[in-house]
Amino acid sequence: MSAVLPVLSTRLSAAAAAAFGTSYDPELRSSTKPEFGHYQSNLALRIGNALGRSPRDVAARLVALLQVEDLCQTPEIAGPGFINLTLLPETLAKAVNEPETFSSNGQRVVVDYSQPNVAKQMHVGHLRSTVIGDALCNVLRFAGYDVVRQNHVGDWGTQYGMMIEQLLEEGISAESLDLEGLQNLYERSRKHFDADGTFADKARLRVVALQSGDPETRAMWRHMVDVSLDDFDKVYALLGSNLERTDVVGESAYNDDLPRVVAELEQQGLLTESAGAMCAFLPGFLGRDGDPLPVIVRKSDGGFGYSATDLAAVRHRVSTLHADRIVYVVDHRQALHFDMIFTLARTAGWLPGSVPAEHVSFGTVLGPNGKPFKTREGGTVKLVDLLESAVARADGLLAGREGVDRAATARAVGIGAVKYADLSSDRGNDYVFDLDRMVAMTGNTGPYLQYAHARLTRLLAKAGTSAGEVTTLEDPAEQRLALLLTGFAATVEQVAQTLQPHRLCTYLYDVASALSTFYEQCPVLSSEGATRASRIALCTATRKVLQDGLGLVGIGAPDAM
Ligand code: ARG
């Protein structure tokens, strides 16, 4: 049996269609305390308004046609024409015992996320894309999509010409440099480039050599990329990210496609020359001054840039990867870029109307002072350092706990706390990186949910069984918990559509809160007979929802903490 709410909605729609031939979304609302399992629909009011008829008469017609005796008590009409529905406890119990599952939807979704840049440490800005992207991939897969991850690493561009030329001048071998060495090399080469015209010319020639595949140049570049990817892998391992080396399809992968992309746009008459650069001007895209904004596909120096690469990537994702949906997890500052890329790709016929392309935008991580996160010296904060301090903080909390695998648990709790804080508020918002708040055991935090799970695990171990079914649901607290559990699949589905992971976090927090009320109102181990068995089954179902839900947002659920 599937979740109760969608079934009720479908039945209401069917009654409305039979009586009035209209198709309305019934928008069921759960009425709040004191008793749960109550729903109210304003469908009759909306139909009444639309057709100019009395809502109470419309409600009476709907109720006469509504077939819900297998799910609800007899529907009631209230006030101006609301329809009140009260679930039967058996309906709820059955829905908890037979949770809804997903099967493949036959759709492939390509998710572009993480995307750090070569020769630079991953910084806190890459945290959000990685954490949100991982969570969305898990959710989309769970909801039946075939998920293809694409780590669009920044591994191409004119800076590699400068860096390679600098290495050659200094007589240093590329092999001798680690990521920090590369970062310093970049600084030196940048200064040199700005100060010395001869060097700048050599660097430009070196870019040409790189792009045309000169073996010596390519080998040096390859080394820089490999050193960087090794370092990213360490951060992914610490984060527990699902990204693999095979998901890396960096900017360089599109190098050979770029001339063709530009040629095709030109053939289609979509390009205009502007100050030596080839640009597309799209209707409706204007700058602050009201002038048309260009998508620059070829720069005046003949080089291709970020936009050309993204156009090639869209084309590849549709025609080679056969994407049915494309998702980009990138910070909000690139909103206009993606809007223009998607528009141009649609105009050029590379992105059919049937394939949605979505920019999953997110806000900035702020430091304690409420400004974008920087070190005291004004540098960027290394992500590894932040993650390690979160694990250390969690380790401190676990001091003296018995029966806990301290190192593994500290990692799960520390990393989980950071991820949960990132995912639990609307991704469009900025947030302050505040470790104290993140690792708190109370409130809407990762550790609070992990603790709810660990406590259930302990209770079930004491109970000695986790088998059995929910049979009786008498107390409102257990009804409310049961009702929430039946909403898991619908919540996952909603996140798969809206790409808003905070909805799943809010749901899990509601479950954990309902669980704690349930503990207060309903003894489990000290109850008897059928009630005890049913409550143990309810706890088992709750544990599974918490475990699955935390898993989807990429957070471990230790058995003890
Ligand atoms: N590497 C880029 C940056 O750090 C983000 C890339 C986003 N993805 C894309 N397809 N453009 O800003």
Image (tube, rainbow, N blue to C red):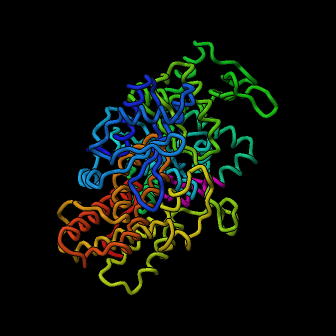
Query: Looking at the image, which residue is at 63% across and 27% down?
Result: 298
Query: Looking at the image, which residue is at 72% across and 23% down?
Result: 276
Closer to us: 21 or 332:
21
Which quadrant, please, contains the N terminus?
A: top left
Residue 324: x and y in percent read: 41, 30
Residue 171: x and y in percent read: 57, 53
Which quadrant, please, contains the C terminus?
A: bottom left
Which residues lie in the magenta part? 170-187
Q: In this view, does 375 lie above or below 331?
A: below
Query: Looking at the image, which residue is at 52% across and 21% down?
Result: 260
Q: Is residue 337 above or below residue 175?
A: above
Secondary structure, magenta segment, majority class: helix
324 sits left or right of 464 in the view: right
Closer to us: 536 or 333:
536
Residue 274: x and y in percent read: 74, 22
Q: In this view, does 29 lie above or below 301?
A: below
Closer to us: 482 or 101:
482
Residue 75, quarter of picture = top left
Residue 402: x and y in percent read: 32, 84
